[in-house]
Amino acid sequence: MIRFVLAIAWTVIFLVLSIPIIIIEWLIGFIWPHAKSRSSQWIVTRAFAVLVFIAGTKVTFIGEENVPKDRPVLYTPNHRSIFDIIITYIKCPRQTGYVAKKEIKKIPIFSLWMLFMNCQFLDRSDLREGLKMINRCVELINDGSSVCIFPEGTRNKTYEQDVMEFHEGSFKIAEKTGCTIVPVTINNSEDVFEAHFPKVRKCHVIIEYGKPIETKGLSKQECRQLSSKIHDIIEETYRKNQTLV
């Protein structure tokens, strides 16, 4: 319970103390929007690193060499915990916008940081807004920013399936841009918090970056198969890495 209290305290302290920095970042954005995104991500990832330390979470990263450093990519992780964003964000080698549910936009101050980092908010009940969000992600990729989207569409709360079914629309971003897809497999992140709410406990999380999948030049049929192909890769990797937890 102490770790939970410390985690909440650190989050509140960071958000409150960062208000003057938000104003500075907002002003920077008028002149250098790319600089604002990069500096905002640098600041937030440092705050996330402290949060991971407070939680006592040991993270093993596998396959970091599979992440291209010279171009934007589409990350497609499975989703088991709110900590998935926190843990993976600290390893993004370039500016990356995450796709998050629209409810997060209601969190004061934190939602501003997410907007500064080019994060996109998804309304899962509105198909038209979902299409607009995909188009905004396409613009981010074309502008040189990576994007991270959770193809399961929501957090796996029951754990009855290792990896839930993927939404094909998540891969439209790669289909429209021809960008590289990096499958990301996360094991045991639910044991940080959700598996024993409200306690935050020490645990070991495994994150593996799969071999990059090139999408440029794929036929329409091959694009339609991306969802099932990457789902199978992540599911197989998840089962393999369960032995490492």
Image (tube, rainbow, N blue to C red):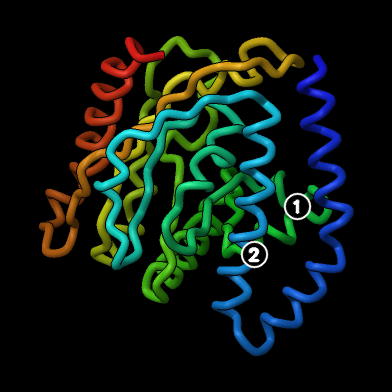
Q: Quadrant of the C terminus?
A: top left
In this orientation, which residue lies closer to the viewer: 164 or 96? 96
User: x, y (%) of residue 200?
Assistant: 70, 18
Q: Quadrant of the N terminus?
A: top right
Badge 2 crowding class, 10 Å Cα cut-off, few under 14, some 14 to 19, many 20 or more, is many
19 sits to left or right of 191: right
198 sits to left or right of 239: right
- Mark 1 highlights which residue? 110
Badge 1 crowding class, 10 Å Cα cut-off, few under 14, some 14 to 19, many 20 or more, is some
User: x, y (%) of residue 136?
Assistant: 49, 67
Q: If you read the primary sequence from the N terminus, does the residue marked by circle 1 or circle 2 appear first?
A: 2
Q: Residue furthest toward the bottom?
A: 31
For image coordinates 35% across by 14% down, the residue present is 244
In what element is the residue under mark 1?
helix
- Mark 2 highlights which residue? 40
- In the image, which disc is placed on residue 191? none
Q: Quadrant of residue 50?
A: top right
User: x, y (%) of residue 143?
Assistant: 42, 76
Q: Nearer the viewer, mark 1 or mark 2?
A: 2
User: x, y (%) of residue 182?
Assistant: 29, 47
In this orientation, which residue lies closer to the viewer: 10 or 162? 10
Cα gap from disc 1 to disc 2, whole angstroms: 11 Å
Residue 125 versus residue 232 in the image, above or below: below
Mark 1 belongs to which amino acid?
A: Phe
For image coordinates 68% across by 36% down, the residue present is 51
In this orientation, which residue lies closer to the viewer: 243 or 113? 243
Mark 2 belongs to which amino acid?
A: Ser
202 sits to left or right of 160: right
For image coordinates 35% across by 38% down, the residue present is 184
